[in-house]
Image (cartoon, rainbow, N blue to C red):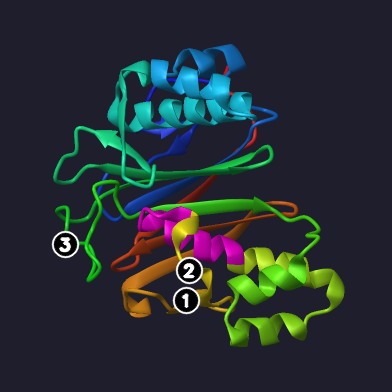
Amino acid sequence: ISLGVKGPSVNSHPIAQFPGEIDLWHCDMRSPLLPQSALLAYLSNDERQRMETYRKGLTFGLCRGTLRHLLSQYLDTDPQAIALGYAPHGKPYLLPQTELGLEFSLSHSGDQLVCAIGFRRGPLGTDTDQGSSVAGLLGVDIECIKPLGDLDGLIQRCLTPSEQETLTACPNDERAARFFHYWVCKEAYGKAIGIGLGVSFGAIAVDLTAPRFVQLPAASPATWQLHLWQPADSVVAALAYPGSPATVRFHSVTEPML
């Protein structure tokens, strides 16, 4: 399998080249894009230090190595040469920023990783009525669906009254899965605006049937787009971004690049 960019592509998947295109990459880290040693060799000194201090340092390192490999295909550069900055709440972004630069958002849960990559569709600061952060306004979240010990408490803290009623009507064996569907949508929005879990989940209302935002804490729901999908069994992910609908491509890379 070629590692080169022809078309361009990653593992035969065509990639975004223009504003208004967003790629969503799903990878199972049990079968990473490249051998672990290759992915870890891409890390910066700062990322290596963080990997050594984190409880799940290896997972962090593999995710960052995968991110660098993917970004390098869009930028046509060495993964190690990519410079990252960090917004006030820790969201990484590419340096230097350009008027129509590349944006990304990364999330992982267990062995599952998802990365959103796309080109900004307007100058910084003009993307929404809320304004744009330097880190861009793409947000993605992925979660492995699993039993939750304090599900009732999480429902009360994180969901609106109408969402709570929806879950009450669900069969007991479906409530956790439905909760995670709400969760990924809300965290994707939080990551898009650069504050992640700092956003008030209870101030965000989601209609899962569309899916779409019904209520947001500091923006008109009509100005935001929401995509919800299941990249693997018992795994759910969401993408949030502002503006008009983009061309979104879903890629699930199920075999390593050799």
Q: Main secondary structure of the magenta part?
A: helix
98 shown above or below 120: above
N-terminal of the pair, mark 3 or mark 2, is 3
Residue 183, quarter of the rendered image: bottom right
- Residue 200 badge: 2
Q: Position of residue 170 (x, y in %)?
A: 78, 80
Q: Which residue is mark 1?
A: 203
> Tag 1's secondary structure?
helix
Identify the residue at image location x=40%, y=68%.
Answer: 225
* Residues at marks 3 and 2 touching, judged by CB atoms closer than 8 Å: no
* Residues at marks 1 and 3 touching, judged by CB atoms closer than 8 Å: no
Bounds of the magenta span? 183-196
* Res. 239 visible in picture: no
Quarter of the rendering occupied by the C terminus: top right
> Tag 3's secondary structure?
loop
Identify the residue at image location x=62%, y=82%.
Answer: 163
Identify the residue at image location x=59%, y=60%.
Answer: 229
* Residues at marks 2 and 1 touching, judged by CB atoms closer than 8 Å: yes
Q: Which residue is mark 3?
A: 126
Residue 173 magenta:
no
N-terminal of the pair, mark 1 or mark 3, is 3
